[in-house]
Amino acid sequence: AFSPDGTLLALGDDDATIHFWSFPLTTTVENGKELTFGTANNDDSVYALAFSPNGSYLVAGGGLGDSDANASYWSATARAGYIRVNLTHAATAVAFSPGGNAIAGGEITCGKVFMCTN
């Protein structure tokens, strides 16, 4: 996922890590602290990432099959987690609303969607 201002790129992997790079890419060195998405020693795959419209927050979706499936909400600037929502199945799609006050996503295989709002 690219930040709204286009200066930061976030990529998730299947080893439960979210990596950041400055964009445009001028080096192979990552931009600051990476985030650990997995819990309880699970290597949860990160299937989906989205930045909030103002670029301050990042939501990640994924899991390890149907176990430890979740969506997590992070501060993109502080690289710290705020909230984790456990799901029935791995989240394969996440998105912020245009106003940034809601997060929606979809779970794999089951046809379920979720929404979190303040």
Image (cartoon, grey):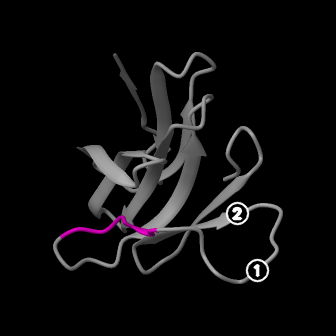
Q: Magenta part of the protein: which range? A: 33-39
Instruction: Pick the residue in front: 42 or 26.
Output: 26
User: Are the residues flagged by discs 1 and 2 in contact, CB closer than 8 Å?
Assistant: yes
Image quadrant of residue 85?
Answer: top left
Q: Residue at x 58, y 41 (%)?
A: 51
Q: Is residue 60 placed above or below 118 in the rendered structure?
A: below
Percent position of residue 18, x then y: 49, 67
Q: Name the residue under label 1.
A: 27
Q: Which residue is drawn at 55% across and 30% down?
A: 96
Label 1: state its secondary structure. Answer: loop
| Residue 78 among those drawn in magenta | no
Hey, what amino acid is under mark 1? Thr
Of callouts 1 and 2, which one flags the residue occurring earlier in the amino acid sequence? 2
Percent position of residue 24, x then y: 83, 63
Q: Mark 2 points at which residue?
A: 22
Label 1 – label 2 distance at C-alpha? 8 Å
Hey, what amino acid is under mark 2? Ser
Label 2: state its secondary structure. Answer: strand
Instruction: Pick the residue in front: 83 or 5.
Output: 5
| Horizontal relation, residue 112 to residue 28: left or right | left
Instruction: Pick the residue in front: 54 or 100.
Output: 54
Q: Residue at x 53, y 22 (%)?
A: 100
Q: Residue at x 22, y 68 (%)?
A: 39
Percent position of residue 13, x then y: 52, 74
Crowding around mark 2 (Cα neighbors within 10 Å: few <14, some 14 to 19, many 20+) is: some
Instruction: Pick the residue in front: 59 or 24.
Output: 24
Image quadrant of residue 113?
Answer: top left
Crowding around mark 1 (Cα neighbors within 10 Å: few <14, some 14 to 19, many 20+) is: few
